[in-house]
Image: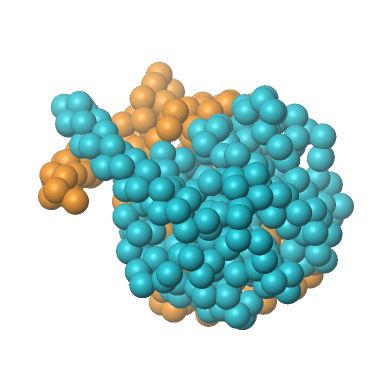
Chain colours: A cyan, B orange
């Protein structure tokens, strides 16, 4: 197609602009001592249930978490997450298939980042498009539910390569769908050798304490001097 | 962003080109009397299991189906579909989040369309990007598995608006996830009033005969003169 070289150039400019905004965000997060984790997955992988449970557990332990959640339409997720009592903002992207750093910057708005210990950014449900967009996060989680099948890392390698931690969700359904844990983990390793994988169920709570421990420890590693 | 008007123009050109290729494909399909259905859904909604079962059942009834399947990487789906004994081709898109009509044209290659009664096109697993791309199909199915949650039509309205028939899959798991059938159907109707919705399980076979009957009837409506 004759338009091909032109769209590649436009795309490169957008990505470059996004990287600059993301770098500035990351510096703001560092200065405010807030640990930022983003979540990417297919639609319906359980990002919101997992995040609601995470926010609730962190608050119970005395931390101050907040969340920004992205969707094409509706503020359903923000309403669900707000049940945790944590501050929450919704980004609606219209027809755009991913979040960009400038949208996160806009959503932060007048929040004082120094009032937060953790900030979570829930991306649009999409295993392709979010891969290329840095959001200034410290940790990118790629979620995969047991109901989606063990082969997803092989079929969507780019997004797994852009992530830091793979989270297998809906563990309570593993038996019903005959989920092959070893195959799923092997597939993650084959596209991204060394990527840590955790398994959990936000519904039953199984694996959630381990996840919270990882999160708190990652924040400490990054240089927490505020304590709780 | 200063690049915005330019990318909109480039995108418009690509869509226009795609529509032209899709229109030519649709005319070829009509001339060859092949009924073409495409499938879009999230990753892991069960498109391939549903399609494998559909191909097998159509062959058992004496029809001649074929399939083209799209993924970013791997030919796993083509290998699974080939177990039905139907002709199958795999498109791998690299980092592209959707199929385009020119890719379908390329995949058809040297197939004689007159040897086929049905052609299925399985899109990349993505509830956003495939919405804008006409593939020359006669029927676009939007699949939604019970494990994804009833709210997906509200959160991804564009793709549901681009579809002709909603298919609720993995019905065998409905009880385990406390799936609310009425809410899911109401959500489909609220974004696309009048859209037919069917429910089925490729695993247990429930609802599959009704689906095959719809397919055969839609092909007849379109003017089948070949019989079987």
Above or below for B2 versus A9: below
Q: Is residue A177 left or right of residue A162?
A: right
Q: Is residue B73 visible?
A: yes
Q: Quadrant of the C terminus of chain B?
A: top right
Name the residue at the right extreme. Answer: A175
- Residue at 46 percent across and 65 percent down: it is A113
Above or below for B55 versus B161: above
Above or below for A26 versus B178: above
Q: Position of residue A106 (x, y in %)?
A: 33, 64
Q: Is residue B28 visible?
A: no
User: Foreground residue, A124 or B141?
Assistant: A124
- Residue at 43 percent across and 48 percent down: it is A26
User: Foreground residue, B23 or B215?
Assistant: B23
User: Foreground residue, B45 or A196?
Assistant: A196
Image quadrant in which you'd find residue B226 = top left
Q: Position of residue B73 (x, y in %)?
A: 53, 28
């Amino acid at each position: 197609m004759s338009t091909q070289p032109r769209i590649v150039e436009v795309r490169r400019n957008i990505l470059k602009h996004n990287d600059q905004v993301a770098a500035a965000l990351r510096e703001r997060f560092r200065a405010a001592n807030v640990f930022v984790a983003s979540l990417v997955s297919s639609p319906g992988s359980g990002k919101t249930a997992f995040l609601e449970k995470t926010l609730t557990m962190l608050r119970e332990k005395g931390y101050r978490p907040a969340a920004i959640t992205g969707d094409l339409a509706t503020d359903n997720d923000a309403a669900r997450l707000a049940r945790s009592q944590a501050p929450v903002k919704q980004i609606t992207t219209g027809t755009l298939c991913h979040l960009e750093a400038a949208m996160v910057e806009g959503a932060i708005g007048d929040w004082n980042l120094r009032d937060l210990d953790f900030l979570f950014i829930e991306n649009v449900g999409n295993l392709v498009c979010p891969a290329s967009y840095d959001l200034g996060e410290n940790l990118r989680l790629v979620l995969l539910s047991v109901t989606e099948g063990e082969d997803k890392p092989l079929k969507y390698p780019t997004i797994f390569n852009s992530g830091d931690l793979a989270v297998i969700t809906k563990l309570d359904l593993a038996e019903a769908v005959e989920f092959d844990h070893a195959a799923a983990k092997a597939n993650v390793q084959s596209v991204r050798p060394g990527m840590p994988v955790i398994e959990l169920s936000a519904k039953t709570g199984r694996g959630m304490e381990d996840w919270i421990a990882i999160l708190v420890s990652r924040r400490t590693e990054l240089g927490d001097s505020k304590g709780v």
